[in-house]
Image (spheres, rainbow, N blue to C red):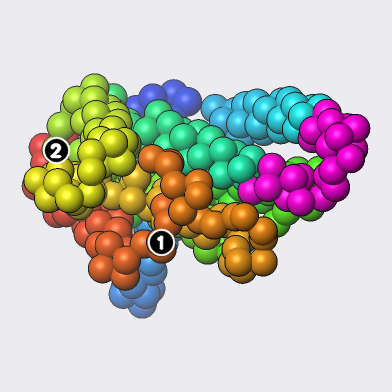
Amino acid sequence: MSRPPFTRVGHAFSPYNRVDALLSNSFYAPSNRHRRKDQRRKYTMGWLLITRFTIKEAIRRRLFLTMAILTLLMLVLFSLLIHEAIGRMQENNVANGMDPTLQTLYAGIAITILAMWLVYLIISTMTIFLTISMISGEIEAGTFAVIVPKPLRRAEIIFGKWLGYALILGAYTLLLSLAFMGIIYWFTGYWPTQAFAAIGMLEMSMLVLLGLITLGGAFVPTAANGVIAVMLFMGAFISSIVQFAIPGQDYTIQNITAVISLIMPTDAMWHGASFYLFPAAVGLLQGFTVSSVNTPFTATQPISPALLTWGVLYSLVLPLIAIVRFQRRDL
């Protein structure tokens, strides 16, 4: 019995044409003996195929190349600025008869906080713009109508796309954070003793935002999903400023900001990261304490286990709800 030909449908340059072809070839059972084996394989290959082609689509759109070039330019400019700033500061300290070592270390701590906050903003912005159309955009373009009828479950489509973007953004978060920390260490000698704990919190903030966007994509159109993500992200940031400006005895403000942190935990994850960017043994630095740099952008204590657990559940449960919704959604 000859294998029936398959027909490519959909967008001419869509990577899902290749998914369609691979699924047609991979899951075709030429005999009853192989039918059950192929039936078992297809459910393990489906989400891997979607993840693979999500990453390949990012490469095809030159996303990686654009990110690499812009990131390299940003790091070069950052290196030049920090080199000039630290050089002038050390010259002034020497001219005034002061030891520049301790002042350089203080500067390294401050620059690390600012640089990682920049990383947090960059990653959050990229998460919104890269993933905003991962579900609703594909539905509006008719792409899912091509691949859903194939032997591929809808849950595998959502999970595969979520995993693909999580890998892309997670790798970029790690590399960008290490690059900034490495540059700061080169010029100031400061490296956070809990650097990877801080990076882990930045990864969590990205996954929280990705989970929200995944959920929104299954319920609302692309434009509405983008508005919701941006407004909640900015609202969480503004609430932290309000909480800092209002005295801590105002329990109404505390309750409101706590609710906002539960609805959108990204800013709470950043504050958890900022705590780990300070040196662990702050008492060894003369005149320096974490409370001395208490700002709306930093935290004086680590994130609570309950809030961290909520962030983990948030980033996992929201995509699961999106999967359930996508199972019932008309394409």
Q: Nearer the viewer, residue 9 or 309?
A: 309
Magenta: main secondary structure equals helix
* Circle 2 residues within 10 Å: few <14, some 14–19, many ≥20: some
Residue 54 lies, in percent from the top left, at: 46, 42
Q: Earlier in the sequence, mark 1 or mark 2?
A: 2
Q: Image height check: is 26 above or below 36? A: above
Quick check: marks 1 and 2 in contact, CB under 8 Å?
A: no
Q: Residue at x 11, y 41 (%)?
A: 329
- Residue picked out by circle 1: 301
**Where is residue 255 shown, x and y percent of the image?**
12, 50
Picture quarter containing residue 136? top left
Element type at mark 2 = helix
Disc 1 to disc 2, how far (Cα)?
A: 37 Å
Q: Nearer the viewer, residue 270 or 148?
A: 270
Can residue 186 be spotted in the picture? Answer: no
Instruction: Specify the quadrant that holds the N terminus.
Output: bottom left
Asked if residue 172 is positioned above or below residue 200 in the image, the reply reads: above
Q: Which residues are magenta?
A: 86-109
Q: Residue tagged by mark 2?
A: 219
- Secondary structure category for the residue under label 1: loop
For the point 76% across and 51% down, the residue is 102
Asked whether 23 falls inside the magenta stretch, the response is no
